[in-house]
Amino acid sequence: MTYPVANPKVIQRARQVLALNPLFLDTETTGTGPEDVIIEVGIVDAEGGTLYDKLVNPGMPIPAESSAVNEITDEMVAKADPWPRVWAEIEPILRGRAVGIYNAEFDLRLIRQSNAAHNIREALADAQTFCMMKLFAAYYGEWNPRYNGFKSQKLEFAGRSCQIDLANTHRAVDDARLTAALLRYIAARG
């Protein structure tokens, strides 16, 4: 089978979401486990314009394996704001907006974990977010019979397969910008 399949319903959904003038968020973290927290936040508008780009002091050492992926070191975050201050800045930006996230389940979990680590009870409403990884998986159309659903693809693969000339750098604002470009690309198909 030739990919992407590009189902017209997925393209229509992308156009509907783009009409909401969404924001796009990405985070970098100390890791993927239940105790890990956010060390960088990037937010862009639908055109990829930077609205927020900030490192976060996690209050703990960043594991070497995480630094190897995102190239964020303890020295880089030593004088960065702690999560409560960053959350106080980003929450008003995101409030009431549709927010696109590539692998939303992961980033939303890390936002909840970062908030819980600081006794912050607020979080992004699941209803205001949409997962661009799932949208791209449906657009690309590769079926995964094991999970009875479309196969998830990495952001780097998604950008490359759509010939989007933005790198997946594993830095928050760059990856948020690539996610926004991916939605624009899908919405412009057909």
Image (tube, grey):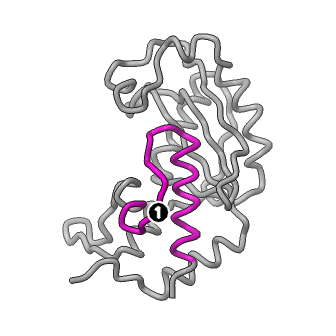
Task: Assign a secondary structure to mark 1.
Answer: loop
Camera-nearest residue between 5 and 127: 5
- Residue displayed at 43% across by 47% down: 168
Q: Is residue 101 left or right of residue 5?
A: right
* Disc 1: which residue: 164
As for residue 3 lying within the magenta part, the answer is no
Q: Is residue 85 above or below residue 142?
A: above
Start and end of the magenta stretch?
Answer: 159-187
Q: Residues within 10 Å of mark 1 (few under 14, many from 20)?
A: some
Q: Is residue 145 left or right of residue 125?
A: left
- Residue displayed at 57% across by 29% down: 114
- Residue displayed at 39% across by 29% down: 31
Camera-nearest residue between 124 and 27: 27
As for residue 183 lying within the magenta part, the answer is yes
Specify the principal SS of the magenta part: helix
Q: Is residue 63 above or below residue 169?
A: above
Q: Quadrant of residue 129?
A: bottom right
Residue 81 placement (x, y as % from top left) = 68, 19
Q: Quadrant of residue 71?
A: top left
Q: Quadrant of residue 83?
A: top right
The type of residue carrying mark 1 is: Ile
Residue 5 placement (x, y as % from top left) = 34, 82
Q: Is residue 2 above or below residue 148?
A: below
